Image (cartoon, grey):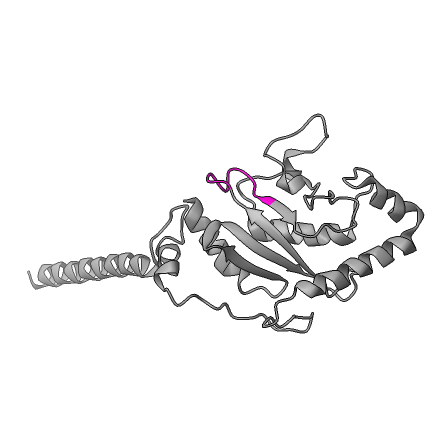
Amino acid sequence: MAERILMNEFKTLLKEKWVHVQLHNDDIFNWDVALIVINPDSIYYGGYFKASMTFPSNYPYAPPKFRFLKPLHHPNIYTDGKLCISILHAPGEDEMSGELASERWSPARRVESVLISIISLLDDAEPSSPANVDAAVMLRKEPEVYRQHVKADVEKSKLDIPADFEMPTHDTPVREPVEKEDHDFWADSDADSDVFGGSDSDDDLDMVQSSGSDMEEDEDESADDDSTETRKV
Protein backbone atom coordinates (compact mmCIF):
# COMPACT_ATOMS: atom_id res chain seq x y z
CA MET A 1 0.00 0.00 0.00
CA ALA A 2 2.83 2.42 0.82
CA GLU A 3 4.19 2.23 -2.72
CA ARG A 4 0.82 3.07 -4.29
CA ILE A 5 0.19 6.01 -1.95
CA LEU A 6 3.67 7.44 -2.49
CA MET A 7 3.41 7.08 -6.26
CA ASN A 8 0.13 9.00 -6.28
CA GLU A 9 1.64 11.73 -4.12
CA PHE A 10 4.75 11.88 -6.29
CA LYS A 11 2.68 12.30 -9.46
CA THR A 12 0.66 15.07 -7.82
CA LEU A 13 3.77 17.00 -6.78
CA LEU A 14 5.17 16.81 -10.30
CA LYS A 15 2.50 19.34 -11.25
CA GLU A 16 3.48 21.85 -8.56
CA LYS A 17 5.79 24.74 -9.40
CA TRP A 18 7.05 25.35 -5.84
CA VAL A 19 8.77 21.98 -5.54
CA HIS A 20 11.02 19.90 -7.77
CA VAL A 21 10.84 16.18 -6.98
CA GLN A 22 12.72 13.22 -8.40
CA LEU A 23 13.09 9.61 -7.34
CA HIS A 24 16.55 8.77 -6.07
CA ASN A 25 17.75 5.78 -8.11
CA ASP A 26 14.11 5.11 -9.09
CA ASP A 27 13.35 4.23 -5.46
CA ILE A 28 9.85 5.35 -4.46
CA PHE A 29 10.94 5.41 -0.80
CA ASN A 30 13.79 7.86 -1.45
CA TRP A 31 13.16 11.26 -3.01
CA ASP A 32 15.39 14.07 -4.14
CA VAL A 33 13.52 17.26 -3.33
CA ALA A 34 14.12 20.95 -4.00
CA LEU A 35 11.94 23.51 -2.30
CA ILE A 36 11.44 26.62 -4.43
CA VAL A 37 10.29 29.78 -2.67
CA ILE A 38 8.01 31.64 -5.09
CA ASN A 39 6.47 34.06 -2.61
CA PRO A 40 7.91 37.48 -3.57
CA ASP A 41 7.33 38.75 -0.02
CA SER A 42 9.58 36.07 1.49
CA ILE A 43 13.22 36.81 2.33
CA TYR A 44 13.89 33.35 0.87
CA TYR A 45 12.35 34.29 -2.48
CA GLY A 46 14.18 32.73 -5.41
CA GLY A 47 15.84 30.03 -3.33
CA TYR A 48 16.28 26.48 -4.61
CA PHE A 49 16.85 24.42 -1.48
CA LYS A 50 17.84 20.81 -2.12
CA ALA A 51 16.86 18.13 0.36
CA SER A 52 16.33 14.42 0.74
CA MET A 53 13.19 12.65 1.90
CA THR A 54 13.06 9.03 2.96
CA PHE A 55 9.88 7.11 3.73
CA PRO A 56 9.35 4.12 6.02
CA SER A 57 7.89 0.90 4.67
CA ASN A 58 4.77 1.44 6.81
CA TYR A 59 4.06 4.93 5.41
CA PRO A 60 1.72 6.75 6.06
CA TYR A 61 1.49 5.32 9.58
CA ALA A 62 4.97 6.64 10.36
CA PRO A 63 6.41 10.00 9.24
CA PRO A 64 9.04 10.55 6.55
CA LYS A 65 12.49 11.92 7.28
CA PHE A 66 13.60 15.22 5.76
CA ARG A 67 17.05 16.80 5.58
CA PHE A 68 18.39 19.83 3.74
CA LEU A 69 21.55 18.85 1.88
CA LYS A 70 23.04 22.25 2.61
CA PRO A 71 22.12 23.46 6.12
CA LEU A 72 20.52 26.88 6.32
CA HIS A 73 21.27 29.46 9.00
CA HIS A 74 17.88 29.12 10.67
CA PRO A 75 16.72 28.73 14.29
CA ASN A 76 14.84 25.50 13.57
CA ILE A 77 17.36 23.77 11.30
CA TYR A 78 20.19 21.72 12.80
CA THR A 79 23.72 22.05 11.46
CA ASP A 80 23.34 18.66 9.72
CA GLY A 81 20.29 19.93 7.78
CA LYS A 82 17.64 18.12 9.80
CA LEU A 83 14.61 20.01 11.07
CA CYS A 84 13.03 20.71 14.40
CA ILE A 85 9.38 20.65 13.30
CA SER A 86 6.43 18.96 14.96
CA ILE A 87 4.84 17.60 11.78
CA LEU A 88 7.75 15.17 11.32
CA HIS A 89 7.52 13.79 14.86
CA ALA A 90 5.90 10.41 15.53
CA PRO A 91 2.13 10.35 16.10
CA GLY A 92 0.66 11.04 19.53
CA GLU A 93 1.05 13.68 22.21
CA ASP A 94 4.40 14.33 23.88
CA GLU A 95 4.14 15.52 27.47
CA MET A 96 7.83 16.37 27.63
CA SER A 97 7.75 18.79 24.69
CA GLY A 98 4.15 19.85 25.13
CA GLU A 99 3.36 19.01 21.50
CA LEU A 100 -0.24 18.08 20.80
CA ALA A 101 -1.16 15.11 18.66
CA SER A 102 -2.76 17.50 16.17
CA GLU A 103 0.63 19.18 15.64
CA ARG A 104 2.53 15.97 14.99
CA TRP A 105 2.46 13.41 12.21
CA SER A 106 -0.70 11.42 11.54
CA PRO A 107 -1.62 8.97 8.76
CA ALA A 108 -4.01 11.60 7.39
CA ARG A 109 -1.10 13.90 6.49
CA ARG A 110 0.63 13.82 3.13
CA VAL A 111 3.99 14.82 1.67
CA GLU A 112 2.53 18.04 0.28
CA SER A 113 1.43 19.24 3.73
CA VAL A 114 4.89 18.47 5.13
CA LEU A 115 6.69 20.44 2.43
CA ILE A 116 4.30 23.40 2.74
CA SER A 117 4.90 23.43 6.50
CA ILE A 118 8.65 23.46 5.95
CA ILE A 119 8.44 26.37 3.51
CA SER A 120 6.27 28.25 6.00
CA LEU A 121 8.78 27.55 8.76
CA LEU A 122 11.54 29.30 6.82
CA ASP A 123 9.86 32.69 7.25
CA ASP A 124 8.04 31.91 10.50
CA ALA A 125 10.92 30.69 12.62
CA GLU A 126 10.36 29.68 16.24
CA PRO A 127 13.42 30.92 18.14
CA SER A 128 11.90 29.88 21.48
CA SER A 129 12.67 26.21 20.77
CA PRO A 130 15.78 26.40 18.60
CA ALA A 131 17.78 23.70 16.88
CA ASN A 132 20.42 26.34 16.08
CA VAL A 133 20.89 28.56 19.13
CA ASP A 134 23.24 30.99 17.37
CA ALA A 135 20.70 31.61 14.60
CA ALA A 136 17.92 32.07 17.15
CA VAL A 137 19.93 34.64 19.13
CA MET A 138 20.87 36.47 15.93
CA LEU A 139 17.26 36.62 14.78
CA ARG A 140 16.19 38.18 18.07
CA LYS A 141 19.09 40.57 18.65
CA GLU A 142 20.43 41.31 15.17
CA PRO A 143 17.60 40.79 12.69
CA GLU A 144 19.34 42.71 9.89
CA VAL A 145 22.47 40.57 10.20
CA TYR A 146 20.23 37.51 10.17
CA ARG A 147 18.63 38.70 6.93
CA GLN A 148 22.07 39.00 5.35
CA HIS A 149 22.79 35.38 6.28
CA VAL A 150 19.49 34.36 4.66
CA LYS A 151 20.32 36.24 1.47
CA ALA A 152 23.67 34.48 1.35
CA ASP A 153 21.96 31.10 1.73
CA VAL A 154 19.55 31.98 -1.08
CA GLU A 155 22.38 32.91 -3.43
CA LYS A 156 24.31 29.73 -2.60
CA SER A 157 21.20 27.65 -3.24
CA LYS A 158 20.92 29.01 -6.77
CA LEU A 159 24.17 27.24 -7.65
CA ASP A 160 22.29 23.95 -7.32
CA ILE A 161 19.67 24.77 -9.95
CA PRO A 162 20.03 22.21 -12.77
CA ALA A 163 21.16 23.67 -16.08
CA ASP A 164 18.05 22.36 -17.89
CA PHE A 165 15.61 23.47 -15.17
CA GLU A 166 13.55 26.62 -15.65
CA MET A 167 13.10 28.35 -12.31
CA PRO A 168 9.46 29.29 -11.67
CA THR A 169 8.21 32.53 -10.17
CA HIS A 170 4.90 33.50 -8.60
CA ASP A 171 3.65 34.28 -12.13
CA THR A 172 4.60 30.90 -13.59
CA PRO A 173 1.61 28.69 -14.47
CA VAL A 174 1.33 25.19 -13.05
CA ARG A 175 3.50 22.86 -15.09
CA GLU A 176 2.41 19.58 -16.59
CA PRO A 177 4.13 16.46 -15.23
CA VAL A 178 6.71 14.73 -17.42
CA GLU A 179 6.16 11.03 -17.12
CA LYS A 180 8.76 8.35 -17.73
CA GLU A 181 8.75 6.48 -21.02
CA ASP A 182 8.25 3.25 -19.10
CA HIS A 183 4.47 3.43 -18.84
CA ASP A 184 4.38 0.40 -16.54
CA PHE A 185 6.12 2.65 -13.99
CA TRP A 186 2.83 4.51 -13.54
CA ALA A 187 0.40 1.68 -14.18
CA ASP A 188 0.18 0.25 -10.66
CA SER A 189 -0.63 3.66 -9.23
CA ASP A 190 -3.39 4.34 -11.76
CA ALA A 191 -4.92 0.93 -11.30
CA ASP A 192 -5.10 1.21 -7.51
CA SER A 193 -5.42 4.94 -6.94
CA ASP A 194 -8.31 4.46 -4.51
CA VAL A 195 -6.26 2.67 -1.86
CA PHE A 196 -8.77 3.23 0.89
CA GLY A 197 -11.62 1.42 -0.84
CA GLY A 198 -14.86 2.73 -2.31
CA SER A 199 -16.42 2.23 -5.73
CA ASP A 200 -14.01 0.94 -8.35
CA SER A 201 -15.27 3.38 -10.95
CA ASP A 202 -18.04 5.81 -11.78
CA ASP A 203 -18.95 3.57 -14.72
CA ASP A 204 -19.83 0.75 -12.33
CA LEU A 205 -22.04 3.10 -10.36
CA ASP A 206 -23.75 4.30 -13.55
CA MET A 207 -24.40 0.70 -14.59
CA VAL A 208 -25.99 -0.09 -11.23
CA GLN A 209 -28.17 3.02 -11.41
CA SER A 210 -29.13 2.28 -15.03
CA SER A 211 -30.02 -1.31 -14.19
CA GLY A 212 -32.20 -0.17 -11.30
CA SER A 213 -33.95 2.34 -13.57
CA ASP A 214 -34.66 -0.33 -16.20
CA MET A 215 -36.18 -2.62 -13.56
CA GLU A 216 -38.45 0.18 -12.39
CA GLU A 217 -39.60 0.80 -15.98
CA ASP A 218 -40.37 -2.92 -16.45
CA GLU A 219 -42.39 -2.95 -13.23
CA ASP A 220 -44.35 0.13 -14.37
CA GLU A 221 -45.13 -1.46 -17.75
CA SER A 222 -46.27 -4.67 -16.04
CA ALA A 223 -48.55 -2.71 -13.73
CA ASP A 224 -50.08 -0.90 -16.72
CA ASP A 225 -50.75 -4.21 -18.49
CA ASP A 226 -52.49 -5.63 -15.40
CA SER A 227 -54.62 -2.50 -15.15
CA THR A 228 -55.66 -2.80 -18.81
CA GLU A 229 -56.63 -6.46 -18.41
CA THR A 230 -58.75 -5.58 -15.38
CA ARG A 231 -60.66 -2.92 -17.31
CA LYS A 232 -61.34 -5.37 -20.16
CA VAL A 233 -62.89 -7.85 -17.76
Is 177 part of what is drawn in magenta?
no
Seen in the picture, residue 27 relative to 88 is either above or below; the reply is: below
Where's residue 185, x and y in %? 38, 59
- Horizontal and vertical percent for residue 206? 31, 61
Question: Which residues are drawn in magenta?
Answer: 56-65
Q: Does residue 78 appear to the left or right of 91 in the view shown?
A: right
Q: How many marks?
A: 0
User: Where's residue 27, x and y in %?
Assistant: 46, 51
Of residues 131 and 116, the one nearer the viewer is: 131
Residue at the image position 47 percent from the left and 38 percent from the top: 58
Report the side of 136 relative to 90 (left or right).
right
- When asked about the image quadrant of residue 161, the answer is bottom right
User: Which residue is at the front of the view, 193 or 29?
Assistant: 29
| Magenta segment includes 61 | yes
View extreme (right): residue = 141
Quadrant including the C terminus? bottom left
* Residue farthest toward the top in the current orientation of the protein: 95
In the picture shown, does residue 161 fall above or below 197?
below
> In the displayed structure, does residue 101 sit left or right of residue 125?
left
Q: Residue at x 88, y 43 (%)?
A: 137
Residue 126 place in picture, x, y as percent: 79, 43
Q: Residue at x 66, y 51 (%)?
A: 69
Q: Nearer the viewer, residue 54 or 121?
A: 54
**Residue lying at 71% horizontally and 26% vertically, measured from the top left:** 96
Left or right placement of residue 16 versus residue 195 in this view: right
Q: Is residue 207 visible?
A: yes
* Occupied quadrant, residue 158: bottom right
Give the prevailing secondary structure in the magenta stretch: loop
Can residue 38 be seen here? Answer: no
